[in-house]
Amino acid sequence: MTLSARRQPADSPTTSPRLPREALLIVEALLVVVVIAASVMSAYGVLWNDTKVRLLPIAAVVGVGLAVLALTRFSWFVLLLLAIRPILDAVKISGSASGTSAGNTVADRGADPSAIIVVLFLLAAILWFAGLIARGAAKPLSLLSWALVSFGVTAYLSLLGSEFPQSTALEALRITSVILMFLVLEQLISSRATLIRLLSACYVGLLFPIVYTVGGVVFGYDVYEVQGSLSRLSGPFSQSNIFARYLAFLVIFAVAILPYVKRRWWWPLLLLLSVAVIFMALTVTLTALVGTVLAIALLGHLQRRNGLWLGLIVVGISSLAFLPGLLGRLESLDNTRQLGGAASGSSLTWRLQYWLEVLPLANRNPITGIGLTGTQYLTSEEKQPHNDFIRAYVETGVIGLITYLLLLVALVLTVRLALRRAQPATFDHAVAAGAAAVVVAFVSNSVFANVMSNVVCLWYVIAFAAAANYIARGEPAGRRPASANAALAPG
């Protein structure tokens, strides 16, 4: 899958203004200074056995390089972020406590490479948008854009009732990065070639965590999360649940577009897809697996591919036969573990009990909520609610719940319009169907998991939604036969 790009016209929103030659020379000189300083600091970090001192200088160099790319080739900067984001958690500094009150501070999480990337993207995107608006080259915002912005506003409004404003602001910034990613992609996707480059970047990104996980299995470095007697594959991520959801969204969309991929990329994508499915099963994450089943079943209906339903049956039976941990996970659904138990498990009973504890917190501030992340500070379990609808209500109030529901409605309307505009049995229709299936998986996961601010997963949900939005707005050039649309990579 190649990311080669055709030269954009001067007024294209994907073209970033170039810096003057003198400014570029100054930037290059500063980059040399940063590289030398980073090398010295990293060497000291090795001597002191300090992980932060070792990694932060390297992160600084990478950050400066990305900043230069953002200023000179913004569209390539965005594609690169989508390609590298899944592997960044492999060098996470703050640990695996992202869903609890532990480690949820700027001091703990602000030094993570993933957090640095988010901040860099926010700054670059704001500057890029300012230039776009100044040139009068911005497209009108879609319904989905307005819905995302509305929910983003309620995220910041939740600061009014927050007892932990630092953590709330940090979470609001994470949500803002998801919103800005869609707004940016809505502007950038102005041609079929750009759309294909976007999808290519997403699947180049999938290659990195797959290779990392295979390396961990072969060479023995840690790619598992142990919960009681159960060992669950987590790959480069801090939690197996995050790995599973990331894989699920990429697998679902790949299944949709696979029949329309160029022949030279069909087998590599199929191999990548097959490994991803195996790894997703090894995470033993029921919410992701159930969401994937629902999504693939929908694809079978939308694309009239009866073989997908048969494939679901075969894969399901094989998984239960060869993965005893998955069967044990299913049996744990009726466990009666009480709040405060040792492991979170997959117990439905635990979730129901926890939701009953979480819901009364909304009474503290029913209009704007107790603040994002407030739940994990004000409950005995110190965890997020494991339900994004409850979380929206409790942490962002009635206003936040309404805007969150409107956001889901906008997602559904966008993929529905894309399906109606696209001719069946074409690449356009496959993109629309894939986005619709991803939305189904996202919503089903949101009922039993914490997905609302999971940037590493949501950037790809948003990317696929942006692809569908491009089709929904009627921008593809006419109706063409399936063979003309059958391409994942330009060439």
Image (tube, rainbow, N blue to C red):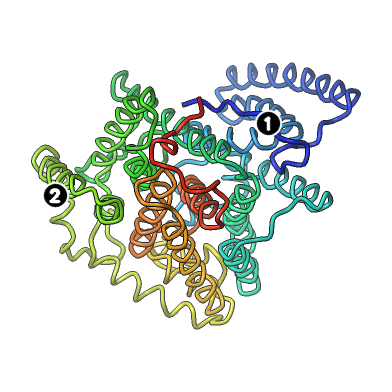
From where the camera sits, is residue 345 visible? Answer: no
* Camera-side mark, 1 or 2: 1
Residue lying at 39% horizontally and 45% vertically, measured from the top left: 426
Q: Nearer the viewer, residue 110 or 307?
A: 307
- Whether residue 57 is visible, yes or no, is yes
Write the residue at 15% across / 64% down: 334
**Secondary structure under badge 2?**
helix
Position of 389 relative to 304 (above/below): below
Distance of mark 1 from mark 2, alpha carbons?
45 Å
Q: Quadrant of residue 172?
A: bottom right
How would you rate the neighbour count of disc 2 (Cα within 10 Å): few for under 14, some for 14-19, many for 20 or more? Answer: few
Q: Amino acid at mark 2?
A: Gly
Residue 482 vertical position relative to residue 29 in the rendered view, above or below: below
Query: Residue under circle 2?
Result: 328
- Point out residue 7 in the picture as x, y percentages from the top left corner: 68, 29
Please give left or right for residue 175 compared with residue 297 in the image.
right
Q: Residue 357, percent across and down?
A: 37, 74
Q: Earlier in the sequence, mark 1 or mark 2?
A: 1
- Asked whether disc 1 touches disc 2, contact meaning CB atoms under 8 Å apart, the reply is no
- What secondary structure is found at the residue carrying circle 1? helix
Question: Identity of the amino acid at label 1?
Answer: Leu
Q: Is residue 292 left or right of residue 14?
A: left
Q: Nearer the viewer, residue 306 or 72?
A: 306
Q: Residues within 10 Å of mark 1 (few under 14, many from 20)?
A: many
**Can you identify the residue that label 1 sits on?**
66
